Image: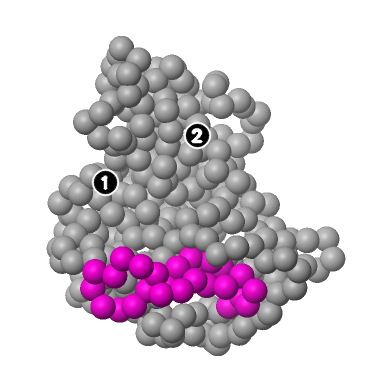
């Protein structure tokens, strides 16, 4: 599982630039496609990646491509991807020849969402994110993907155990998200008219959690990781080998005031002092780092894997 965690985040960096095999899903070259042919592909952004068994799943985001004349499509710089792509990682492949399978979705296209996974049940869930290019948002729904072990699977709506509470949650994007063996966590994020009916941009504090066993959603208030409990563009990593329950660490991202229409961050999560969270006891811990810490940043890639001396490398 830890090796796959490495695959997930490393592959995300790759899929942002990954073209598709020619004639994927028999789409004509001049059509907009979730997986354009190599001759038309430009770039992919805001997608989310998870590994289940021998397949990496690439969900949502936006893709840019050329038109039939070889010019960049200018109606929008990128177009939302309303599907999930999968790649077999049990075989070797190159970016120009990789076979990409496209799986249709009924849910609205999303960018900057969470993609939670449960490896024991081969299941994915999505939460939050914005509608590309400002399209009106669909009504709140919990979407679940059940993989078939062959690179395919099916998306369906799941009824939450507490549907009224779920419907009242404020949708946000660019929160720090992570999966534990039986739960999904979303820290902070920002809301706007692209994420929920209220058009006023505003940071969303606290933690949204989803219990994969009970199907119950919760919203927890805390200022343990920043003054107002906000973070945008940060990263969360689950370290299963630390403590009896594993630990989640938050890294990077910017913080904001709670007033609407804030355009300037109030600060940054410091790489010199990392925050850790026990997903079971809800206890918080902090640890000073040594050496030359990275500079403050947001929207970055991160990867975690077991070290050889009882450490965990990030």
**124 over 184 or under it: above or below:** above
- Badge 2 marks a residue whose secondary structure is loop
Give the magenta part as a residue range. Answer: 249-275
Q: Residue at x 55, y 87 (%)?
A: 283
**305 over 214 or under it: above or below:** above
Q: For mark 2, what is the residue? A: 17
**Where does the image place residue 260, in percent across and percent down from the top left?**
23, 73
| The C terminus, quarter of image | bottom right
Residue closer to the observer: 13 or 4: 13
Q: Residue at x 45, y 43 (%)?
A: 58
Residue closer to the observer: 5 or 189: 189
Q: For mark 1, what is the residue? A: 132
Secondary structure predominantly adopted by residues drawn in magenta: loop
User: What scheme was used to colour the molecule?
Assistant: one colour
Q: Residue at x 41, y 80 (%)?
A: 229
- Badge 1 marks a residue whose secondary structure is helix
Measured in 3D between alpha carbons, the distance from the residue under mark 1 to the one under mark 2, in whole angstroms, is: 19 Å
Q: Are marks 1 and 2 in contact (CB under 8 Å)?
A: no
**106 over 184 or under it: above or below:** above
């Amino acid at each position: 599982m830890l090796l796959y965690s490495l695959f997930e985040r490393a592959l995300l960096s790759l899929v942002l630039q990954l073209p598709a095999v020619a004639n994927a899903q028999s789409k004509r070259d001049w059509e907009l496609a979730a997986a354009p042919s190599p001759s038309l592909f430009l770039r992919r952004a805001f997608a989310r990646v998870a590994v289940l068994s021998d397949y990496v799943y690439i969900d949502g985001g936006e893709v840019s491509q050329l038109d039939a004349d070889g010019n960049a499509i200018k109606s929008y710089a990128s177009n939302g991807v309303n599907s999930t792509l999968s790649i077999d990682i049990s075989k070797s492949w190159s970016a120009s020849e990789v076979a990409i399978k496209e799986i249709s979705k009924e849910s609205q296209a999303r960018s900057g969402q969470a993609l939670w996974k449960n490896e024991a049940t081969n299941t994915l869930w999505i939460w939050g994110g914005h509608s590309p290019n400002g399209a009106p948002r669909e009504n709140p729904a919990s979407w679940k993907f059940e993989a078939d072990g062959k690179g395919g699977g099916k998306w369906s709506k799941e009824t939450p155990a507490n549907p009224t509470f779920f419907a009242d949650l404020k949708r946000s994007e660019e929160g720090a998200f992570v999966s534990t063996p039986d739960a999904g966590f979303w820290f902070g994020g920002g809301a706007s008219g692209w994420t929920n009916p209220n058009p006023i941009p505003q940071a969303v504090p606290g933690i949204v959690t989803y219990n994969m066993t009970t199907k119950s959603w919760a919203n927890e208030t805390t200022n343990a990781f920043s003054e107002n409990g906000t973070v945008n563009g940060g990263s969360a990593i689950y370290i299963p080998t630390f403590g009896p329950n594993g630990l989640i660490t938050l890294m990077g991202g910017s913080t904001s005031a709670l007033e609407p229409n804030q355009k300037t961050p109030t600060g940054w999560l410091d790489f010199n002092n990392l925050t850790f969270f026990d997903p079971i006891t809800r206890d918080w811990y902090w640890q000073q780092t040594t050496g030359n810490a990275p500079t403050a940043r947001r929207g970055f890639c991160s990867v975690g894997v077991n070290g050889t001396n009882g450490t965990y490398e990030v």
